[in-house]
Image (cartoon, rainbow, N blue to C red):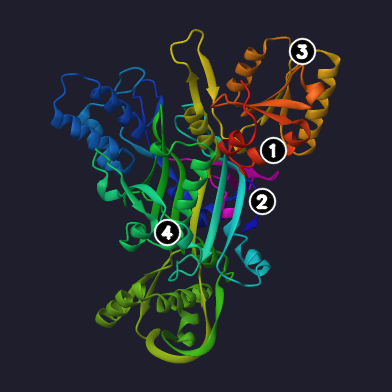
């Protein structure tokens, strides 16, 4: 997997080609009196949530409202307006009437350069920077497919209603992987390693308001075409493994498939890893099969070849359709547009889904209105300009536009969910409450607290020495030399999620041993000082479990 870092400022042409300028929108409504904006689907969800709190609501009506809420972000503009009118949705803050929903583009536009004539946007995703560099990445790979490129960086979206802390903001950290693969061969070489992974799946067909998930292995999901292909399932399973490893609760994790009406303009299949929090189910990682859309669009617009080439072991006879274009007629008729007409006709010949209706209309009517996908231009093509014939040739390989499988991680959302899932209270009911962040050791910001039992010079010297050794081993450490009791210092460390505490006591100068305390179990063991750094390094990197360590070393009470 390659790692790249591309510009956050993106030319308008790039995002026009990708479809974001025209289609990267949410539906918005306004308070007709104050003009205050609301995101339409969120306003509808909030209205339904309030209605569902009523004790007098009938079960049939409750089920109907839950079904509407489940589909809130999948409605068309007309359907959304109809539903909001039927339910009497009003402006949340004032109770005033609201306008009809309308599209609002979520990108931040900006002029580029002193003249202001070049227009650009702050990127709404990091992916486009990878797509526009695909040719260089493929060359770096020596032309070998498949391969992936990853990027971590800021993205910007002009959210209608930022809210919920880190969950809906206008500037946020993303981590995206673009996995390039043959569009007809989406198997993954390491699929067998995750085939038996069980995931909680919520297919589009099951999103009826009850939203009951079905635990399904990756292998069964692909076999039954619940998940479209192995590569998409592979990244979903790896995402689940990652989220569980960092501390997300498995019972609060599901994968929800996008309905056809909410699918992004570039996606052919899409599954969101959603995590349940006090705000409800939150989309944290999107998994999209972007098909060949992005590279095809950029190639058509720039006229740069973004194809990959696979060499076969032995030559093969290949049947394909060739467009026989009357170039002598094309030039005089279309002049400066002759080239784009020729390229579009060749593209149609190579695409069976477009070729058959085109050829049928040309045969029946003698003329076809042809639309250029990238620019929207229309040209009238008659039968004197082109014909199509089936050709068989011997070839040593094939050229194709790669498809893209994309996992897209919202870092801020994942961090928020992690904080909520890891926050616990020790001895509930105790006053004051003793809060604990139960971060797994690999993601805890501070791994170890070093706690000398007193400010005795000998103990302080040993504490400083141990702290230095831990830092040299790349283990983050906090040396707490305050005069608070050891119990209070343990509690302070627990509150910020430190998994291990090392206490240097009055026996340490004599026996050269320290006490190591584990945060969640509060169990303690006695360990020689010269073993501490290696042992804690292994614990923090999950090379050994606390249970194994607890049984190996003398326990300490």
Question: Element type at marker 3?
Answer: loop
Q: Residue 498 location in percent, x, y? A: 63, 27
Residue with the mark numbered 3: 454
Residue 43 relative to residue 454: left or right: left
Give the residues in magenta: 104-129
Question: Element type at marker 2?
Answer: loop
Residue with the mark numbered 4: 195
Crowd rating for badge 2 (residues with CA inside 10 Å; few <14, some 14–19, many 20+):
few
Q: Earlier in the sequence, mark 4 or mark 3?
A: 4
Q: Earlier in the sequence, mark 3 or mark 2?
A: 2
Crowd rating for badge 3 (residues with CA inside 10 Å; few <14, some 14–19, many 20+):
some
Q: Residue 535 location in percent, x, y? A: 69, 38
Q: Are marks 4 and 1 in contact (CB under 8 Å)?
A: no
Q: Is residue 109 within the magenta segment?
A: yes
Q: Residue 182 location in percent, x, y? A: 48, 70
Residue with the mark numbered 2: 5
Q: Earlier in the sequence, mark 1 or mark 3?
A: 3
Of residues 244 and 131, the one nearer the viewer is 244
Residue with the mark numbered 1: 535
Crowd rating for badge 4 (residues with CA inside 10 Å; few <14, some 14–19, many 20+):
some
Q: Decide: is 216 above or below 524.
A: below
Can residue 78 be seen from the camera position used here?
A: yes
Q: Residue 461 location in percent, x, y? A: 85, 22
């Amino acid at each position: 997997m390659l790692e790249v870092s591309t510009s956050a400022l993106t030319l308008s042409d790039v995002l026009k080609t990708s479809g974001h300028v025209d289609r990267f929108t949410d539906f918005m409504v306004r308070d007709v009196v104050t003009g205050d904006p609301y995101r339409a689907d969120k306003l509808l969800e909030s209205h339904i949530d309030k209605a569902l709190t009523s004790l007098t609501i009938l079960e049939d009506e409750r089920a109907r409202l839950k079904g509407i809420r489940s589909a809130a972000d999948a409605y068309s503009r007309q359907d959304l307006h109809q539903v909001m009118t039927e339910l009497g949705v009003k402006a949340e803050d004032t109770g005033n009437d609201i306008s009809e929903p309308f599209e609002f583009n979520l990108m931040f536009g900006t002029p580029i350069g002193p003249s202001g004539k070049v227009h650009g946007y702050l990127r709404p995703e990091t992916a486009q920077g990878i797509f526009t560099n695909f040719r260089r990445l493929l060359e770096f790979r020596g032309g070998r497919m498949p391969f992936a490129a990853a990027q971590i960086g800021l993205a910007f979206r002009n959210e209608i209603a930022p809210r919920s802390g880190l969950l809906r903001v206008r500037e946020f950290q993303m981590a995206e992987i673009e996995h390039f693969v043959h569009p007809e061969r989406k198997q993954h070489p390491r699929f067998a390693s995750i085939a038996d992974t069980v995931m909680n799946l919520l297919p589009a067909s099951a999103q009826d308001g009850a939203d009951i998930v079905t635990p399904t292995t990756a292998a069964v999901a692909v076999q039954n075409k619940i998940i479209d292909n192995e590569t998409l399932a592979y990244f979903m399973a790896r995402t689940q493994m990652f989220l569980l490893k960092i501390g997300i609760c498995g019972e609060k994790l599901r994968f929800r498939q996008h309905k056809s009406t909410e699918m992004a303009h570039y996606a052919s299949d899409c599954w969101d890893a959603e995590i349940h929090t006090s705000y409800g189910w939150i989309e944290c990682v999107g998994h999209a099969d972007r098909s060949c859309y992005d590279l095809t669009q950029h190639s058509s617009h720039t006229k740069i070849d973004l194809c990959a080439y696979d060499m076969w072991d032995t030559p093969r006879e290949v049947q394909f359709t060739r467009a026989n274009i009357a170039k002598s007629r094309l030039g005089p008729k279309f002049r400066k547009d002759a080239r784009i007409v020729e390229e579009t006709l060749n593209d149609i010949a190579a695409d069976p889904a477009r070729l058959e209706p085109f050829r049928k209309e040309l045969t029946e009517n003698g003329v076809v209105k042809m639309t250029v996908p990238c620019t929207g231009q229309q040209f009238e093509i008659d039968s004197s300009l082109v014909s199509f014939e089936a050709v068989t040739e011997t070839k040593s390989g094939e050229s194709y536009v790669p498809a893209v499988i994309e996992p897209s991680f919202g870092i801020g959302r994942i961090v928020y969910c992690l904080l909520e899932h890891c926050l616990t209270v020790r001895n509930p009911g105790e006053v004051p409450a003793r809060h604990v962040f139960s971060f797994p050791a690999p993601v805890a910001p501070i791994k170890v607290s070093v706690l000398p039992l007193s400010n005795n010079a000998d103990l302080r010297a040993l504490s400083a020495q141990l702290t230095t050794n831990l830092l040299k081993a790349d283990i983050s450490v906090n040396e707490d030399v305050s005069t608070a009791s050891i119990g209070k210092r343990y509690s302070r460390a627990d509150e910020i999620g430190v998994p291990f505490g090392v206490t240097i006591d009055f026996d340490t100068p004599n026996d050269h041993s320290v006490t190591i305390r584990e945060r969640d179990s509060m169990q303690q063991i006695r360990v020689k000082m010269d073993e501490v750094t290696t042992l804690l390094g292994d614990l923090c990197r999950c090379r050994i479990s606390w249970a194994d360590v607890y049984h190996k070393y003398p326990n300490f009470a």
